[in-house]
Amino acid sequence: MNVSTSIGRPDSRVFFAVMSGVMLLIVLLGFGRSLYLRPFLNLPALPAAVWVHGSILTAWYVGAFAQATLVTSGRTDLHRRLGWWVAGVGAAVIVVGTTVTLAFVGRRAALGTDIEARIRFFSDIVWGDIAAIVAFIVFFGLALAWRKRPDLHKRLMILGSLALLEPALFRIWGWKMFAGVDRNWAALVVLVVAVVLLVLHDLSTRRKVLAVTLLGAVLLVGSRMLALFVIAPSGSGLAAIRALL
C-alpha cells in the first residue's frame, strides 16, 4: 500500500500506532483461551476452518500494528513493501470470515446445541458478524483505493480493524469479573469510545472532524445497531438463521 512522503505530524502517527496496538492486545486477550492457548487446555477440538479464520484475523491485527509502527518510525519503504501482504490478508479475512460466519449455526447444531432454544442469541452473533464483514469490506476497499492519501488511509485502516473487533470484545466481557454485563452493549460502548477518540484526535490535530471519520463512525456504529436491534430480532432475521441449519 503506497503512502506519500507526507505522513502527518509525529503525534498523529503515534496515535494511530497506539490505537492499532491496543486493538491487537484486545484480540490476543479475547482469543487467548479459546484459540491461542487451546492446545494446552482441556477443550474440544476446533474445526480447521476456525483455526484458519483465527490465524488470518490475528495476522490482520499484527500487520496493521506493524504498518502503523513502521510509519511512526519513518520506515515508509518497509511500509510499502509490507502493504500488499497486509492487503492479501485483508482479502482472506473477508473470504474466510464470511465462510465461518455462515457455517457457525450449522456447526453448533452438529455439536448438539439446541439452536431454537437460543435462536435470538445465535441471530445476534451471525447478524453482528455479517454487519462487521460488510463494514470491513467498505473500509478496507476505500483504504486500498486511497492508499496514496495517508490521512484518509490510516483512518480507514483503524475503522476496518474496529469493525472486526467485536468477537474479541464479546469474549472479554464474558469473563467472570464482568458477570452480569450485557456483552452486546458493552462491546458497542467500546466501539463508540474508539470513535470518539478518533473525533477528538481530528479536532486536536486538524481543528475539524474529517468526513471520513464522521461517515466511518456512522457506518461502524450504525451497521452494528441495525444488525443487533433491528435485523437480528425480526422475523426475517430469525428465519435466515434457521435456514442456515
Image: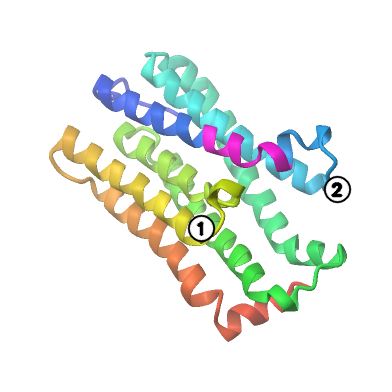
Amino acid, disc 2: Pro
The relative height of residue 60 versus residue 13 in the rendered view (above or below) is: below
Q: Position of residue 198 (x, y in %)?
A: 30, 42
In terms of secondary structure, where does tag 2 sit?
A: loop
Span highlighted in magenta in the image = 25-34
Q: Identify the mark nearer the N-term, 1 or 2.
A: 2
Q: Amino acid at mark 1?
A: Val
The residue under the point 39% across, 43% down is 156
Name the quadrant containing residue 234: bottom right
Residue 52, given in percent of the width and then of the height, sits at 75, 41
Secondary structure, magenta segment, majority class = helix
Residue in the image at 39% along x and 64% along y: 222
- Residue located at (47% from left, 73% from top): 229
Residue 43 in the magenta stretch? The answer is: no
Residue that label 2 marks: 44
At mark 1, the secondary structure is: loop
From this view, report whether residue 231 is shown above or below residue 66. below
Q: Position of residue 146 (x, y in %)?
A: 37, 40
Using a 10 Å C-alpha cutoff, classify the residue at mark 2 as few (fewer than 14 neighbours), some (14 to 19) or many (20 or more). few
Of residue 44 and residue 85, the one placed in the foreground of this image is 44
Q: Quadrant of the C terminus?
A: bottom right
Residue 88, visible in the rendered structure = no
| Left or right of 171, for residue 143 | left
CA distance for labels 1 and 2: 26 Å
Percent x, y for residue 182? 51, 61
Q: Residue furthest bottom?
A: 235
Query: Which residue is rendered at x = 20% and y = 46% of the image?
Result: 209
Reply above or below: 12 against 91.
Answer: above
Q: Quadrant of residue 77?
A: top left
